[in-house]
């Protein structure tokens, strides 16, 4: 059974940090790019960051560049999203996803999805 399980969300004050984890199982992790997405009720899902399967090339949406860092540990089948200098507008449900097409910030590139973890940034 394919599973992607996010953890690490929570409530933090503006300027604070959180590290999200995405633990994968049920598929060959090394063969998949992993993306992080976020969604606020009433708005479309937004690609935040992604990392390629091979050389670890990463991409970020403009609003998080310089604040968020994505990394992967293939030995642990886990991808991390370090989020620093958090802002209230970062508040959302964050989900990770896995896909074989290639790294990118479009949801359609990803086949498997986790349930998400809530991140709330207070002002």
Image (cartoon, grey):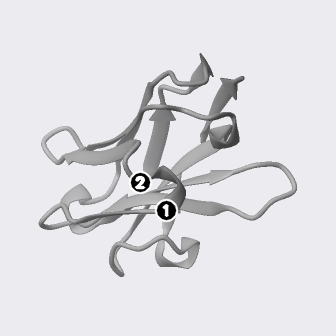
Q: Quadrant of residue 55?
A: bottom left
Q: CA distance from mark 2 to mark 1?
A: 5 Å
Residue 92 as seen in the image, left or right of residue 104: right
Q: Is residue 2 above or below residue 102?
A: above
Can residue 10 be spotted in the picture? yes
Between residues 60 and 116, which one lies in front from this camera angle?
60
Of the 4 image quadrants, the one containing the C terminus is top right
Q: Quadrant of residue 90?
A: top right
Q: Work out which residue is located at the far bottom of the displayed protein and give it.
A: 101
Q: Is residue 112 above or below residue 122?
A: below
The x and y percentages for residue 118 are 65, 32
The x and y percentages for residue 117 are 60, 35
Can residue 1 be spotted in the picture? no
Dot 1: element:
helix
Residue name at image x 53 percent, y 75 percent: 106
Q: Which residue is mark 1?
A: 62
The x and y percentages for residue 48 are 50, 57
Q: Which residue is mark 2?
A: 65
**Dot 1: few (<14), some (14–19), or many (≥20) neighbours within 10 Å?**
few
Q: Is residue 89 above or below residue 43?
A: above
Mark 2 near mark 1, Cβ–Cβ under 8 Å? yes
Between residues 94 and 1, which one lies in front from this camera angle?
94
Residue name at image x 68 percent, y 37 percent: 91
């Amino acid at each position: 059974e394919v599973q992607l399980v996010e953890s690490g969300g929570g409530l933090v004050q503006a300027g604070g940090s959180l590290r999200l984890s995405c633990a994968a199982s049920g598929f060959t992790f090394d063969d998949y790019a992993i993306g992080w997405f976020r969604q606020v009720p009433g708005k479309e899902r937004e690609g935040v960051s992604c990392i390629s399967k091979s050389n670890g090339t990463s991409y970020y949406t403009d609003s998080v560049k310089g604040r968020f860092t994505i990394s992967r540990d293939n030995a642990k089948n886990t991808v991390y999203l370090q989020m620093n200098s958090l802002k209230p507008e970062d508040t959302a449900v964050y989900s990770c996803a896995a896909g074989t097409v290639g790294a990118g910030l479009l949801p359609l590139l990803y086949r498997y999805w986790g349930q998400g973890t809530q991140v709330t940034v207070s002002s």
